[in-house]
Image: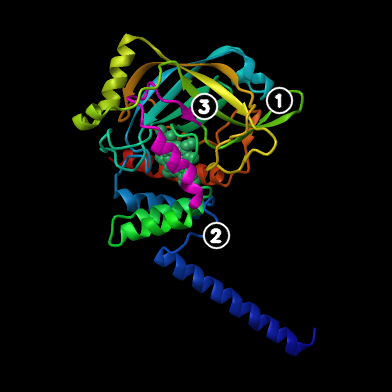
Amino acid sequence: MPAQYRRHVLLALFLTLSAGLGCALLVERNGWAAPSSLSSPAGAAHMVDAFEAVSGPQPGFRRNHAKGLCVSGRFDSNGQGVALANTGLLRTGSYPVTGRFSVVGGNPSVNDTQGGMRSLALDISNGGETWRMALNSSPVFFVRTPEALLEQLQASVPADGREARIRHFRRDHPESQAFEDWMAAHRPSTGFDNAAYFSVNAFRFNSADGQEHLVRWRLQPETPYAPLSDEQIAQNDPDMLSYGLASRLAEGPLRWHLILTPALPGDPVNDATQLWTQPGHQEIDAGVLVIDAQQPQMDGPCRDIDFNPLILPPGITPSDDPLLQARGAAYAESHRRRVREMAGQ
Ligand code: HEM
């Protein structure tokens, strides 16, 4: 390449890089956008900062789903799930479970009658394999990408202009409609015990005969769903969910069925905002989750667990759903911060 062209190319490259770096610094300092990938450690820190900006500092608590309680029990697998994944935890047997019920948001003292959703996180282990999952009581999520979640958090910061920012977010994210519709049509359940909990994201299941299936799952309660009544809402008991669970457990263990649903061709497997609406899905009942005890989260066995949904047993791997890698990174960052804060107390 002639010398004068080489000089031009180098100059152009230098200008491009400095402009890029300058923009990145500006963008980062002003919080307009995240670093390139929200699944990187820097991106996860940015995401967790955004959760903190919405709820204010709550040292020692999870940066989302801050209010919750620990539970324990077992998963009685009936072996049916092995048809989909060659996983020890899906073979017939009984495996210990440590779990956590929670409500959404970063405020550990939020009033239980306010939230529209219940959540359940589980660690199922057999000594060699561990399966962690964090499930919500809605079958779909309100955004498709971590970038959109970050946008929503930034719009929700309690500061001037919040309402307009949220209105703009809604206008720009029609993909939230299925979530909004579902929430409008389903009043929250009266308790943690009578809600179904959904994986929302799909995961890849690999069976022993080499077949691959994309699978969503849910935990279906044996206790029938009952919607929160107007009277319960009016009573405004801030801790109704933990008291309710304690009184149900005093009567005996609670049970949910693990229902595995493989995708049909054409199902949106990488988009957690969409339901799988085609008729004819196969549903495999893989066994029963039995919860028989509850403990406070402050010193219970779930406190220091990172219920990172990417901690999976052999035979199950993440799908290409863009939320999943960002979830893994953000949960790890939130866990790192709260464990360090607890250690410093
Ligand atoms: C990119 C998307 C998401 C991000 C960045 C995110 C972020 C977080 C963070 C930071 C925590 C606190 C983790 C900890 O400190 O242990 C958390 C907890 C939780 N998230 Fe998400 N989340 C996302 C999507 C979802 C989805 C799709 C679901 C439901 C399927 C979900 C369900 C939960 C539950 C149940 C917990 C509580 C876990 C526990 O009890 O420790 N999240 N999330």
Q: Amino acid at mark 1?
A: Ser
Residue visible at 48% across and 21% down?
220
Q: Position of residue 298 (x, y in %)?
A: 30, 30
Residue 126: tell me if it is visible: yes
Camera-nearest label, 3 or 1: 3
Residue 151, above or below 7: above
The dot on residue 36 is: 2
Residue visible at 32% across and 9% down?
251
Q: Along the horizontal axis of the image, is 71 left or right of 219?
A: left
Residue 330: tell me if it is visible: no
Q: What crowding class fits label 3: few (fewer than 14 Cα within 10 Å), some (14-19), or many (20 or more)?
A: many
- Mark 3 secondary-structure assignment: strand
Upstream in the sequence, badge 3 or badge 1? 1
Residue 321, above or below 233: below
Give the residue at mark 1.
207
Q: Position of residue 106 (x, y in %)?
A: 33, 43
User: Bounds of the magenta span?
Assistant: 174-198
Give the residue at mark 3.
218
